[in-house]
Image (spheres, grey):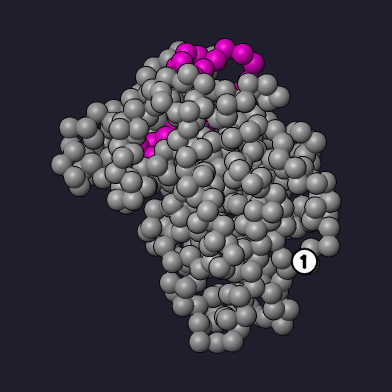
Amino acid sequence: MVSKAIVRLFAAIVALSSASALKLPAEAEKRQLSSTVTSWVTTESPIAKAGLLANIGPDGAKDGGAASGVVIASPSTSNPDYLYTWTRDSSLVYKWIIDQFTAGLDSTLRTGIQNWVASEGRLQQVSNPSGTVSTGGLGEPKFNIDETAFTGAWGRPQRDGPALRAIAMMRYVNWLLNNSGSTEAATIWTYIKLDLDYVASNWGSTGYDLWEEVSGNSFFTTAVQHRSMREGAKLATALGDTTRASTYTTQAGSLLCYLQNYWSSSNGYIISNLNANNGRSGLDTNSILASIHTFDPNAGCESATFQPCSDKALANHKAVVDSFRSIYSINSGIASNRGVAVGRYKEDSYYNGNPWYLCTFAAAEQLYDALYTWNKTASITVTSTSLSFFQQFLSTVTAGTYASTTSTYSTLIAGVQQMADDFVLINKQYTPSSGALSEQYTKSAGTPTSASDLT
């Protein structure tokens, strides 16, 4: 299994960021939180940030001897063995770290960022079971922590890693270009181009999903690939690479078109994996994670990109969350309009199929992102697609647009806020006093299980 970058997810929930560090203000500013949530996040944030940094080589307290810039998934070496580095997860971790640095929240992080960039540049060149740098090797999901190839059996290739790595590096390069760092930016652009070119050439091919279990086309992968192409076109234009800018723009359009295929109007939710004969319903927090990792605070409630407050993303949120209400004992007795513990997908059997901290945080984060946007636009639009989501909080609501001056708006905001806070507080309930976060907690008693100190 793979690390889930909890630290990036948690604090993003609260205007801070991942399982507990602060998020880029532009994406999370002014999230509205209850005093109880605020109090816990204030306490948990420094614990989670320290835990994250402890898992990064070469000086992390729990890095297991990892090379400089390498992010380990967990110090756990058995039941399960997660002492590896995954491209996806290290990129999500460093996206948060870069956001912290570029927002001026922690100037001490720059050396670590440079170490990570250099490490990823080296890993790109490591021949592995997926190929070489020019023959598909960029789709290799994980490596040994000494930057050598992992050659054991695994679900490969995984095509979200290059997109996520490019997104993180582009954030740093954009900062460099605005801060007299053009020479360093030029070097990093050589790494970014490799990943973006890989995405442009391979996005239509199948690969394994973020849970590393299903081979097909994954909603999460397609969504982050689209974001990478869109942002890549902008950066290529800024750097004068007009040919790539054109290529990336074209591929972004094609990816956006393909992204619509995951929506099932008959089911009213996103089918998270296409071209995969896995016997599942398609309900999967893959889709919620995709929505929050492609959140654009300037996109409003755009449906085509499944923005967190879009009608399709909200309908999907309800369907995914509801799928866990009756299958976990710890969710028993919780009202249908309140947050519950959330796992990966209802058919999950890994470690007997439990709630995951990151999945429950993700369910909260989507709602906090939606609240941010509604507050910004001073209105909520209810459509026939999202009606069932909003009726959780006001049974008499009908399709229409409700201004912030109306009682309907106030009632809906309060209901969504309560549910978002519930998800956070459920995780709080099952977090040990140390504040350390494992991968999962048991569905019967809420006891932390699987990998400890997950990055």
For this view, does 180 lie left or right of residue 131?
Answer: left
Horizontal and vertical percent position of residue 116: 37, 29
**Residue occupying the point 60% across, 31% down:** 2
**Residue occupying the point 44% across, 74% down:** 377
Image height check: is 428 above or below 190?
A: below
Residue extending furthest toward the bottom:
406
Label 1: element kind: loop
The quarter of the picture where residue 310 lies is: bottom right
For this view, does 66 lie left or right of residue 325?
Answer: left
Give the camera-side residue of 444 and 38.
38
Identify the main secondary structure in magenta.
loop
Image height check: is 335 above or below 164?
A: below
Q: Is residue 254 magenta?
A: no
Give the camera-side residue of 130 and 78.
78
Give the camera-side residue of 384 and 142.
142
Quarter of the rendering occupied by the N terminus? top right
**Residue occupying the point 29% across, 44% down:** 107
**Residue occupying the point 46% across, 55% down:** 16
Quarter of the rendering occupied by the C terminus? top right
Residue extending furthest toward the left:
180
Horizontal and vertical percent position of residue 195: 39, 30
Q: Which residues are magenta?
A: 144-171
Residue located beneath label 1 in the image:
336
The quarter of the picture where residue 114 lies is: top left
Q: Is residue 155 magenta?
A: yes
The quarter of the picture where residue 297 lies is: bottom left
**Is residue 369 visible in this depiction of the protein?**
yes
What is the crowding at mark 1: few (fewer than 14 residues within 10 Å), some, or many (at least 20)?
few
Horizontal and vertical percent position of residue 286: 62, 45
- Name the kind of residue labelled 1 in the image: Ser
Horizontal and vertical percent position of residue 318: 69, 61
